[in-house]
Image (spheres, rainbow, N blue to C red):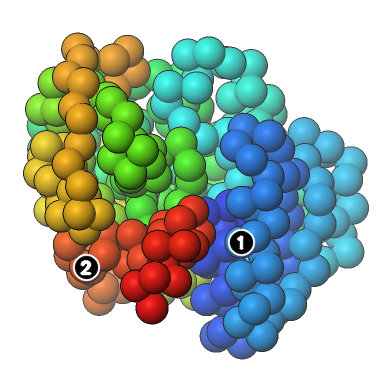
Amino acid sequence: MKILVTGAAGFIGAHTTLRLLRDGHEVVGLDNFNSYYDPQLKLDRVRWIESQGYRFPLRRLDLCDATGLQRLFAAVRPQVVIHLAAQAGVRYSLENPQAYLQSNLAGFLNVLEACRRQPPEHLVYASSSSVYGANQRVPYGVRDNTDHPLSLYAASKKANELMAHSYSHLYAIPCTGLRFFTVYGPWGRPDMSPVLFAQAICRGEPLKLFNHGQHQRDFTYIDDIVESLLRLLDQPPRGNPQWDRLQPDPASSMAPWRLFNIGGQRPVALKDYVSLLERLLGRKAQLELLPLQQGDVLDTCADASDLAQVTGFSPRVELAEGMRRFIDWYQSYYQPEIARARA
């Protein structure tokens, strides 16, 4: 298939792009290479894809450029759109809320408008486990209430789900939203805990554990995210014939729209997660225990049974193995002298 991937130089985007190319799809990428974190990491992800023997057209374009996006869609005429570009980060949304308004709301609207004018067979877009917000019923099911987000980032992702539904209903665009749970692995974002924690441990700096380390997180290895996503690509929703207006199913619709959780389904306490990092790095962490931070949810755990039912696949990489792979990459990228010594 001809597939347009937004955020193709991002963490999930780069892994998804490489897998699509390996599977023989024609991929066109889009990324704005913004400065939320060092753009060099994005450039290096693209070089990593190329080092595997694959090249693909990658357009530098911001989602807020509605005209440029329309032109790209008209030129590419994608069969499938995988929308992964977004302003990420819960805590950054407390500092710079306008970035989320522009990228996650106005930008997503531009994607939907481009899909309206150049309809794909399937629009797959990234949502987040953050949408569950104040809900403390675990595991989180796609039919649980998500009306109480705890951060603007979470609210923007919830809004994306609603915006996609309206366009799916109005213009019959098949839309699948994916609620990702704490994705980690090689080439991960530097603002996420694997890189932040590994850096603090390696440098002997204080490692900040909010909520005194009592959080639990449902870590999901990047390969499991990509496998789940790809298994859904050729299964666009067609509308649920059993959908009842009097008892509406929040995860499906009379429109061709649906939601899935993608999570490891094995939550881990942050203190145990830190202990695993200590063993892999061979160093002790200097812990700084802090109160719960604004915007954070307490615990996350995915109920991914709908994903398993539709695709026959459930995330399977155990945290110990996934973190071993992450640390191998981390040391090769950030500490090449250690990686060379081990080799």
Query: Is residue 12 rendered to the left or right of residue 59?
Result: left
Do we see residue 244 in this rendering?
Answer: no
Classify the position of the C terminus by image quarter. Answer: bottom left
Whole-Å distance between the Cαs marked 2 and 1?
22 Å
Which quadrant of the structure image shows residue 111?
Answer: top right
Vertical order, 218 against 2 (above or below): above
User: Which amino acid does the dot numbered 2 rest on?
Assistant: Glu
Q: Which residue is drawn at the image coordinates 12% and 46% (left, top)?
A: 275
Q: Which residue is drawn at the image coordinates 83% and 37% (left, top)?
A: 65
C-beta proximity under 8 Å, tags 2 and 1: no
The location of residue 241, given as percent across then percent down, is 35, 58
Quick one: SS at disc 2? helix
User: Which amino acid does the dot numbered 1 rest on?
Assistant: Arg
Q: Residues within 10 Å of mark 1 (few under 14, many from 20)?
A: many
Q: How many marks?
A: 2
Q: Which residue is drawn at the image coordinates 50% and 20% (left, top)?
A: 93
Sooner in the amino-acid sequence: mark 2 or mark 1: 1
Q: Which residue is drawn at the image coordinates 15% and 55% (left, top)?
A: 279
Vertical order, 90 against 251 (above or below): above
Quick one: SS at disc 1? helix
The location of residue 174, given as percent across then percent down, is 54, 57
Do we see residue 337 in this rendering?
Answer: yes
Residue 26, labelled with which disc?
A: none
The location of residue 230, given as percent across then percent down, is 46, 71
The location of residue 274, given as percent across then percent down, is 18, 42
Classify the position of the N terminus by image quarter. Answer: bottom right
Which quadrant of the structure image shows residue 54?
Answer: bottom right
Q: Residues within 10 Å of mark 2 (few under 14, many from 20)?
A: few
Dot 2 corresponds to which residue?
Answer: 321
Dot 1 corresponds to which residue?
Answer: 45
Query: Is residue 115 rendered to the left or right of residue 302?
Result: right
Query: Is residue 152 rendered to the left or right of residue 8?
Result: left
